[in-house]
Image (spheres, grey):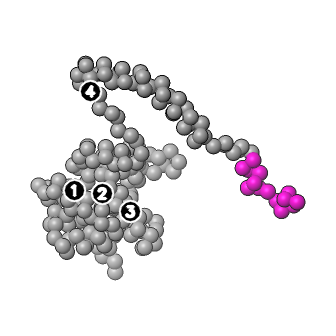
Amino acid sequence: MRHAKKRLQLSRFTSWHEATIKSLARNVILYQSIKTTLTRAKASRRMIERLITLAKENTLFARRQAQRVLKEHKLVNLLFNEIGPRFSKRSSGFTRIIGLGKRRGDDAEMVIFELTEIKKNEAKKIKLDKGTKPQPTQPEDEAAKENVVKENTTEGKNQESKVKDNLAKDKKPQKKFIGGIRNIFRKKSDSL
């Protein structure tokens, strides 16, 4: 009999089910907040809570247990050095699920699945790593502002011409859309 064996299967066979949950756990630890379906969030919640509990212990055995799931040293270090200490005063309730409504295509219930204590600085660092450039800091002195403006006017003309030259070099001729389709659907007899 299957007493007390209930779990969220996610319509997957066992190895695929485990891989899905581990992937969600990795993403929650890395990004602190993800958008997913309600059933996936409920299924992966148990594993994430267990990982954060391990991070609170911060022993070698706990690190090895987390390594088995996360498979990456950087994520284990992030979990044990930053996320674990953040939840040291809590005994449970490390994650929350916030409903977003239904997905348009298949009417699945969408949620934001996140850690309850998120540092906003870390979220910004992750976004900066993805390719956005940080804004330059503005000088506070008016005299410093004037100096920057004078330097920019003299160097600005030279830089504008350099930027235009670089853009002209970087542009590649774009393939025509129809030409690309012709290559895909070309028959053997067309190549003769």
Q: Earlier in the sequence, mark 1 or mark 4?
A: 1
| Mark 4 surroundings within 10 Å by alpha-carbon count, few (fewer than 14), some (14 through 19), many (20 or more) | few
Residue 32: x, y in percent? 30, 51
Q: Is residue 48 visible?
A: yes
50 inside magenta stretch: no
Q: CA distance from mark 1 to mark 2?
A: 8 Å
The Cα atoms of the two marked residues, 4 and 2, are separated by 36 Å
Q: Residues within 10 Å of mark 2 (few under 14, many from 20)?
A: many
Residue drawn at the location 46% of the way across and 72% of the way down: 13
Of residues 66 and 14, which is closer to you in this image?
Answer: 66
Q: Which residue is mark 1?
A: 83
Disc 3 marks which residue?
Answer: 23
Three-letter code for the amino acid on which mark 2 is drawn? Ile
Mark 3 belongs to which amino acid? Ser
Q: Secondary structure at mark 3?
A: helix
Q: Say which residue label 4 marks.
A: 139
Up/down of 114 relative to 47, above or below: above
The stretch in magenta equals: 179-192
Disc 3 and disc 1: Cα gap in Å? 18 Å
Callouts 1 and 2 close, C-beta under 8 Å: yes
Rounded to the nearest angstrom, the CA distance separating label 1 from label 4 is 35 Å
Q: Of discs 3 and 1, which sits in the foreground?
A: 1
Q: Is residue 126 above or below residue 59?
A: above
Q: x, y (%) of residue 123?
A: 30, 46
Q: Which quadrant of the rendered structure holds the N terminus?
A: bottom left
Query: In percent of the image, x 48 and y 24: which residue is there?
Result: 157
Q: Which comes before the other along the chain, label 4 or label 2?
A: 2
The answer to the question of whether label 3 and label 1 lie on touching residues, with beta carbons closer than 8 A, is no
